[in-house]
């Protein structure tokens, strides 16, 4: 996302940007590169925030969503057999890294007084996996109902969150994240 940030966000001069996504960087990293991939993701978030703020673009962060085990009896049996043998599924491994980075996103938002949307909580079950109705059969892609749920959540969460952030800003500071006419969303 960082490589595209100038062209996809800064050059468009939006009032606000939602920065959401890093799971593809986790998917694409080999096991021996996961630690460096996670550090690179953290640096990218910090750099995108810095770039946006230097151009007076309101930043809104969003947590990443977890995966779900693939659907089907064969996948269920394979998952059960793996758990009985003490193995961690691919989805559980990815979800652990997503949880680690989501904690970073929440802490970063708090430390910089940035609005954070907790998309993970909207779509997850009690075990931290994506709920079935929000996952395609492969367990990794969002369904239309997932996007509907995220949209409804964001439309409800953003205005009050922006007002709370504005209330602690100096008098007269504008609240660009609550204006809908120019906003950018960047996510992969």
Image (cartoon, rainbow, N blue to C red):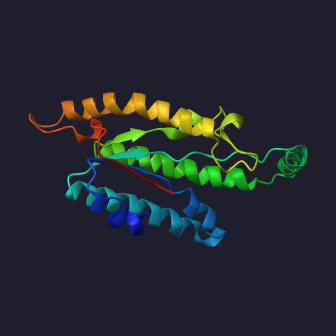
Residue 116 location (% of width, % of height): 39, 40
Outermost residue toward the left in this view: 171
Q: Count of labels shown?
A: 0
Residue at the image point whose x is 53% and y is 50% from the top:
100
Residue 149 lies left or right of residue 113; in this view the side is: right
Residue 34 image-quadrant placement: bottom right
The residue lying toward the viewer, choosing from 102 and 187, is 187
Outermost residue toward the front in this view: 181
Q: Is residue 67 above or below residue 4?
A: above
The residue lying toward the viewer, choosing from 146 and 22, is 146
Residue at the image point whose x is 40% and y is 66% from the top:
4
Residue 109 image-quadrant placement: top left
Q: Is residue 8 above or below residue 3?
A: above
Q: Is residue 97 above or below residue 129?
A: below
Residue at the image point whose x is 87% and y is 52% from the top:
85
Residue at the image point whose x is 71% and y is 47% from the top:
139
Q: Which quadrant of the rendered structure holds the N terminus?
A: bottom left
Residue 146 lies left or right of residue 172; in this view the side is: right
The residue lying toward the viewer, choosing from 117 and 33, is 117
Residue 39 location (% of width, % of height): 46, 64
Residue 18 location (% of width, % of height): 39, 47
Residue 66 location (% of width, % of height): 61, 46
């Amino acid at each position: 996302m960082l490589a595209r940030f100038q062209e996809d966000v800064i050059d468009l001069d939006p009032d606000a940007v939602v920065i959401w996504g890093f799971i593809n960087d986790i998917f694409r990293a080999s096991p021996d590169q996961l630690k460096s991939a996670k550090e690179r993701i953290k640096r990218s978030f910090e750099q995108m925030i810095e770039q946006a703020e230097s151009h007076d673009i309101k930043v809104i962060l969003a947590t990443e969503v977890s995966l779900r085990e693939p659907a089907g009896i064969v996948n269920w049996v394979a998952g059960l057999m793996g758990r009985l043998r003490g193995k961690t599924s691919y989805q559980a491994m990815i979800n652990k890294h997503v949880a680690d980075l989501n904690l970073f996103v929440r802490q970063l938002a708090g430390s910089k007084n940035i609005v954070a949307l907790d998309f993970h909580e909207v779509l997850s079950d009690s075990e931290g996996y994506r709920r079935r109705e929000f996952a395609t059969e492969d367990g990794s892609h969002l369904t239309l109902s997932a996007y509907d749920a995220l949209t409804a959540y964001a439309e409800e969460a953003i205005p009050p969150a922006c007002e709370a952030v504005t209330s602690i800003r100096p008098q007269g500071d504008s609240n660009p994240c609550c204006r809908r006419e120019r906003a950018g969303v960047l996510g992969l």
